[in-house]
Image: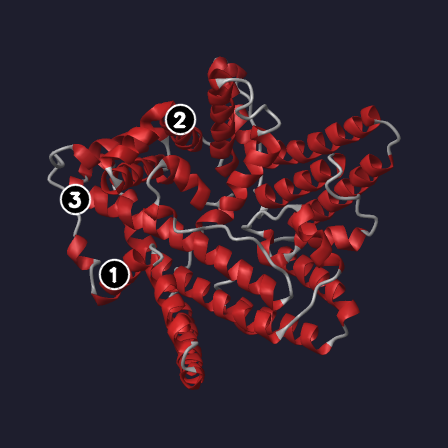
């Protein structure tokens, strides 16, 4: 069930909100847990059995860590928990990838076969959350949760279950135990949710169709202009798709009294790859930093070890996104440029000025997206060639003019502005000036509310009239 679906917007969410608003506070966790499990079950009953199994195993392992008398016993419990969680990921997400690569070592008659395995929704997200819980208990950042429903709610909370942000247990444990609802927080949640919905439906969906159609063309049939348009469309699609979904998750969390951490901070204004990763998918990069990079030694053992640790982190970052060498190459490219910048290139860029460093960062990010989006490695390499070759030798012509109607042009202009902090800055300036004129503040709030209603209704119209509503991060 997508947040940007009519079923969620007009049935599921209103029912859950009504139950929360009308029920005693002591019932809220139970209502949210049942709603979250129903939300996940909508994607398939077998998925829910896997999720429930994961919850139960991590609950028992967490208690084992908490009750163990010695550090050695705690470590054995932790290793068991990590092994089970990683085994789930390998079995359901990477088994075919492993078999395909092992088959390269065998001749045709000795090939391994494996039946298709359905990828459970959100398995990468809820598995990483479970791992963070076990590590936090082992490191004594938080006590083991003795209440199974509370741990189940942490792992399965529907606002961030399918696509994050990845919430660490110690950041939300107190909120699960006790939190307060307020109309101010509730209203800010509605606002954030609608803005995220607008990003997803009005911007990302508009770019998705053109990006999909261009990437569906054989690379040798693409001219440079069409290839660059397709790449830019995809770069905007993935940003507004995923950041919009994160905004909706954060907004939903606020409606129910939770403070879910930010996941994006205008990554396309970054002036280095290092800065890009401080702004893009923040919860994932912080997870890898805290639970992998620092335990590996971080930058404490000299530059060579630091660079090796960075490559390991970005290799696994790419692999986390999908069982494909394309994703691995995407991750390693980012890791390579992180190392280059640490070697002194970032300081060199700073001397050249913000313009050149920004162009460099965008160029690296965009070219790396080719591997992220292309269906396989030959297609990715061909697409990179199409970006810089004079034109297709086949005489094939892709009709860009057919796509660039009024709606796409408006979405593109709005997206280029919304990818910067401009609108946030304008909002802050309005609030600062209106604070000196309280009589106008009410009028501004009315216009803001009307604007949000217009966005919501326009999104609804788009969802009613179009069945095209993809979500990129569902496959991760």
Q: Position of residue 313 (x, y in %)?
A: 51, 29
Residue at horizontal 29 percent and vertical 41 percent from the top: 362
Precedes in sequence: disc 3 or disc 2: 3
**Disc 1: CA contacts within 10 A as few (<14), some (14-19) or many (>=20):** few
Please, what secondary structure does the residue beneath circle 3 have?
A: helix
Residue 461 percent coordinates (x, y): 39, 73
Answer with the quarter of the image where residue 60 lies: top right
For the residues labelled 1 and 3, the Cα–Cα distance comes to 18 Å
* Residue at 47% over, 33% down: 318
Foreground of the two, 378 or 425: 425
Residue at (26, 33) in percent of width and height = 351
Q: Which residue is mark 1?
A: 413
Using residue 194 as the reference point, say whether residue 180 is left or right of it: right
Question: How many C-alpha atoms fall within 10 Å of the one at disc 3: few (<14), some, or many (≥20)?
Answer: some
**Picture quadrant where residue 379 is located:** top left
Question: Residue sitting at 64 percent across and 66 percent down?
Answer: 256
Quadrant where the image shows the N terminus: bottom right
The residue wearing badge 2 is 342
Mark in front: 1 vs 3: 1
Front residue of 301/384: it is: 301
User: Mark 3 — residue?
Assistant: 225
Report x, y in % for residue 322: 49, 36
> In the image shown, does 366 or 100 lie closer to the viewer?
366
Measured Cα–Cα span from mark 3 to mark 2: 34 Å
Residue 370: x and y, percent?
32, 37
Q: Residue furthest front?
A: 436
Mark 1 and mark 2: span between their CA atoms?
35 Å
Q: Is residue 81 visible?
A: yes
The residue tagged with tag 1: helix, strand or loop? Answer: helix
């Amino acid at each position: 069930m997508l947040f940007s679906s009519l079923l969620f917007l007009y049935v599921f969410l209103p029912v859950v909100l009504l139950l929360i608003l009308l029920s005693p506070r002591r019932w809220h966790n139970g209502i949210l847990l049942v709603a979250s499990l129903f939300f996940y079950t909508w994607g398939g009953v077998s998925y829910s059995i896997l999720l429930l199994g994961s919850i139960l195993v991590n609950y028992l392992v967490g208690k084992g860590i908490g009750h163990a008398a010695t550090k050695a016993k705690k470590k054995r419990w932790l290793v068991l928990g990590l092994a089970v969680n990683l085994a789930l990921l390998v079995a359901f997400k990477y088994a075919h990838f492993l078999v395909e690569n092992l088959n390269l070592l065998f001749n045709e008659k000795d090939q391994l076969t494996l039946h298709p395995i359905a990828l459970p929704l959100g398995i990468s997200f809820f598995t990483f959350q479970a791992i963070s819980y076990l590590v936090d208990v082992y490191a004594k950042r938080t006590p083991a949760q003795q209440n199974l429903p509370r741990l189940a709610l942490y792992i399965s909370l529907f606002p961030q279950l399918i696509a994050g942000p990845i919430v660490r247990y110690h950041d939300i444990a107190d909120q699960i135990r006790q939190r307060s609802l307020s109309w101010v927080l509730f209203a800010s949640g509605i606002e954030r949710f609608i803005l995220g919905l607008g990003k997803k439906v009005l911007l990302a969906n508009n770019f998705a169709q053109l990006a999909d159609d261009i990437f569906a063309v054989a690379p040798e049939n693409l001219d440079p202009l069409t290839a660059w348009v397709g790449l830019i469309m995809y770069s905007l699609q993935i940003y507004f798709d995923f950041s919009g979904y994160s905004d909706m998750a954060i907004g939903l969390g606020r409606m129910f009294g939770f403070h879910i951490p930010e996941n994006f901070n205008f990554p396309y204004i970054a002036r280095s790859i290092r800065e890009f990763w401080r702004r893009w998918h923040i919860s994932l990069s912080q997870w890898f930093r805290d639970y992998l990079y620092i335990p590996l030694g971080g930058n404490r053992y000299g530059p060579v070890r630091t660079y090796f640790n960075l490559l390991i982190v970005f290799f696994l970052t790419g692999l986390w996104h999908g069982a494909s060498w394309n994703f691995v190459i995407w991750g390693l490219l980012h890791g390579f440029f992180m190392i280059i910048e640490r070697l002194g290139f970032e300081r060199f860029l700073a001397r050249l000025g913000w313009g050149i460093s920004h162009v460099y960062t965008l160029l690296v990010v965009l070219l790396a997206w080719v591997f992220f989006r292309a269906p396989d490695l030959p297609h990715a390499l061909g697409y990179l060639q199409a970006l810089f070759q004079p034109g297709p030798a086949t005489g094939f012509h892709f009709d860009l003019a057919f796509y660039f109607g009024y709606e796409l042009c408006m979405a593109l202009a709005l997206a280029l502005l919304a990818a910067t902090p401009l609108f946030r800055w304008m909002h802050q300036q309005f609030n600062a000036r209106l604070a000196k004129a309280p009589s106008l503040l009410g009028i501004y709030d009315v216009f803001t509310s009307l604007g949000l209603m217009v966005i919501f209704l326009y999104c609804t119209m788009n969802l009613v009239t179009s069945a095209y509503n993809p979500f990129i991060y569902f496959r991760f």
